[in-house]
Each structure stands twice: as C-alpha cells, then as structure tokens.
C-alpha cells in the first residue's frame, strides 16, 4: 500500500496565499506532466483533504518555500492566535487617542481579511487617483508586527512629499489558556515568516510603494517595469508544441498604450487579476476542432503581467507593489483609456509591442486529437 502523508489543509492554503500562487499555478508546478484539468483537480483534492503522498508533499512544500513539517498538523499552529490593534494619525496627531482593538483571529488564516476590514473603517479612499500616493511600511521587532499605511501628497514648490493621513496597525501573537485567558507569546519562526508573507502580499495589493524591515520595494534608483510572460501550446499531428516568450516594458504610459493596442487586435482576450499581476487568457482558435483536423490548432495561450524591476546585479525580475485599484481598471477594459499618465510621459514616445516574440521550448507526444 502506498504510504500517505497528512497535511493541514488550512496551512496549505495559507502558505499558497502567502507566495501568491493560484491553485492552477500550483498544480502546474506540482504535476507538470498532467493533462488538461487533471493536475488542478488533484491539487484541489489535496488542499481540501490534506491527504497526499510523501513525494508530492515535498513538491508542494518546495513551491511554497517551506518544509513539509511546516505544512503538517501541528499543535502550535492550532493554538496560536493573533491580536490586532490600530489607530489613525492625521498630520502627526492621533485621532482622540483612539486605538481600536480586534480580538484574536484563529491561526492568522483570516489576517488579510481582517486588515481589509480595518481599512474600510476609515475615510481614506484607496480607489481614487490624484496627487496622492499610497505608501506602506512593515517592521517586526521579534514580538510585534507593525504595519503602517498612509497617503502622501507633494508639498507645493517641493519635490519631497509630506504625510497627511497614516494608519498604524500592530499585530501580536497569543494563546488561550483555560485558567488565565489570553496570554501573549513569541511567535515561532515559521509563524512569523507566514504572517510576514501575508502582510507583504496585503501591502503589495494596497500601496504604491512599501518599505519592509528597511528594504524598499521598489528600491531607490531602480527603474520599475512591467514584465510580460507569454506561454502558448499548439497541437500538431499528435505533438504538442510548447512556446514561450518574455519581455519588459518600462514606463506606465508605454505599457498602457501597448496593452490597449494589443487588446484592440485581440477582442476575445479576457483579463483577470492575480497575485500582484494580471493574467490574460486568449480563446483558442479551434475552428477546425474535429478528429480529422490536419492544421495545427492552438490549445492554450496565456499571458501574465507583473510589475517590478530587474535587479542590475543578477538580472532577475523582482516584484514591486501593484495596487488593486490600478489593476482593477486594467481588468475593466472600458476604462483603460481613462487612466492618467505619470508626470514626464507624453504622447511622443514610441509605443512598444505588448506581446513578446514566442520561442519554441519543446514538444510533447500525445494521443489527443481535435
């Protein structure tokens, strides 16, 4: 009988959310040779029940950059809670000294939801453009997680910015004792990393710039760009040909105009938001979809877009914050022409081609016919 591994479904989902992967993306990494939706269905079953093989458990842990022990059922995980407090500061003054408290939330799994609810309590509008920019910060002192979110506006006659409205959020871990009630506790290393990943994902979806433990995203001097990754599969006489291409587009104006022109030429494309990015799916052109088809058929075409910068030392693409309100306007295609340009960008610049050139990456034999 094949040995089995039992993981904690809540920990699997929390770890996946922390690295920003969807179930489909995770399935592609864990089951790269699966056909159609088979891999996705298999992974969804694992995330629902926690049951899998030791080999697959290792693959899942590698995808989430954790260990298998981190994903197993654990008493510490089941009993560790979070306590959240927050306050609003305007022009440097706390509002009437108020510091609302939120009770303990189980295992930190609902942390992103709780933080969203906190922002909804305040009048700050995170979904409007203007002179304001939204900044976020995060620090961990070994016991408390500190989050700051605020808007800054340019000072008249100055290039620097001044703070206007700022929200301070403090998170502490605790446990429940039947005799003493809630007790503060020092979070475990894994729990700290998980909470930090969730906070990072949250801040990246709400702000234009973030400083985490002293590290700026994007860093000073880096040139932000939009990184476009395209993947396509074509079925040709029993062989699936896999193609892939990537490119970077620097400049928000160039990116928006490039995407707009491409969408006009691909009216069937569907844009979806994903973790710190966009996912564009094209309807396969299966006009000759029958068992006797002889022409090559497109069976898969997907383009992902992420925002960040390319590290000058390593050449590796690093992600930067890309607020939900910005990406949402790109998903709603009717509003793409209404998005304002960043200062310094104009209509005279040459607009690059959006989709990268595709290069054949390999072939796979298959019995499938269309």
Image (tube, helix red, strand yellow):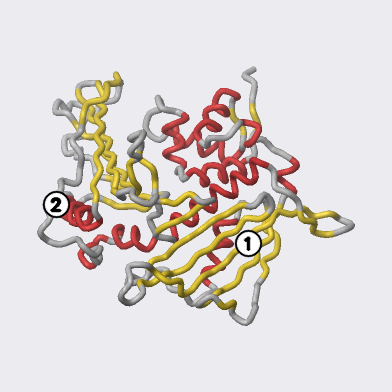
User: Which quadrant, please, contains the C terminus?
Assistant: top left
Q: Position of residue 314 (x, y in %)?
A: 36, 33
User: Which quadrant, please, contains the N terminus?
Assistant: top right
* 32 left or right, relative to 14: left
Residue lying at the far bottom in this picture: please name it.
96
Viewer-proximal residue among 52 and 210: 210
Position above or below: 93 against 285: below
Instruction: Identify the disc placed on residue 351.
Output: 2
* Residue visible at 33% across and 71% down in the picture: 158
Residue lying at the far front in this picture: please name it.
158
* 114 left or right, relative to 41: right
Residue named by callout 1: 170
* Mark 2 or 1, nearer chain start: 1
Position above or below: 227 against 7: below
Q: Position of residue 257 (x, y in %)?
A: 18, 56
* 98 left or right, relative to 243: right
Q: Position of residue 180 (x, y in %)?
A: 87, 58
Q: Position of residue 198 (x, y in %)?
A: 54, 50
Viewer-proximal residue among 348 and 81: 348
Crowd tier of the residue under label 2, counting other residues whose Cα lies within 10 Å: few below 14, some 14–19, many 20 or above: some
Q: Secondary structure at mark 1?
A: strand
């Amino acid at each position: 009988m094949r040995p089995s591994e039992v993981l904690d479904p809540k920990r699997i989902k929390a770890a996946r959310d922390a690295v920003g992967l969807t179930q489909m993306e995770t399935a592609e990494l864990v089951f790269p040779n699966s056909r159609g939706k088979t891999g996705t269905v298999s992974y969804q079953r694992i995330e629902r029940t926690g049951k899998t093989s030791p080999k697959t458990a290792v693959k899942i842990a590698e995808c989430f950059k954790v260990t298998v022990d981190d994903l197993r059922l654990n008493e510490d995980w089941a009993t560790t809670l979070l306590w959240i407090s927050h306050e609003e500061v305007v022009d440097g003054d706390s509002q009437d000294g108020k510091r609302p408290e939120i009770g303990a939330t189980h295992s930190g799994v609902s942390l992103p939801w709780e933080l969203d609810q906190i922002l909804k309590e305040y009048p700050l509008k995170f979904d409007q453009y203007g002179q304001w920019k939204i900044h976020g910060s995060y620090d961990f002192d070994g016991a408390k997680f500190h989050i700051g979110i605020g808007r800054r506006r340019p000072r008249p006659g100055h290039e620097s910015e001044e703070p206007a409205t700022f929200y301070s959020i403090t998170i502490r871990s605790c446990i429940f004792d039947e005799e003493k009630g809630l007790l503060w506790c020092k979070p475990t290393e894994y729990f700290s990393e998980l909470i930090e990943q969730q906070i990072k994902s949250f801040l990246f979806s709400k702000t234009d710039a973030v400083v985490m433990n002293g590290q700026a995203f994007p860093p000073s001097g880096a040139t932000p760009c939009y990184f476009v990754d395209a993947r396509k599969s074509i079925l040709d006489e029993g062989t699936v040909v896999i193609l892939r291409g990537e490119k970077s587009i620097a400049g928000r104006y160039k990116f928006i105009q490039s995407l707009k022109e491409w969408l006009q030429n691909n009216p069937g494309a569907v844009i979806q938001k994903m973790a710190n990015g966009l996912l564009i799916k094209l309807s396969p052109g299966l006009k000759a979809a029958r068992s006797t088809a002889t022409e090559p058929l497109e069976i898969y075409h997907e383009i992902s877009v992420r925002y960040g910068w390319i590290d000058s030392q390593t050449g590796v693409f690093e992600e930067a914050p890309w607020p939900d309100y910005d990406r949402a306007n790109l998903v709603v295609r009717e509003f793409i022409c209404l998005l304002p340009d960043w200062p310094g960008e104009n209509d005279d610049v040459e607009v690059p081609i959006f989709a990268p050139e595709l290069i054949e990456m390999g072939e796979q034999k298959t019995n499938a016919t269309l």
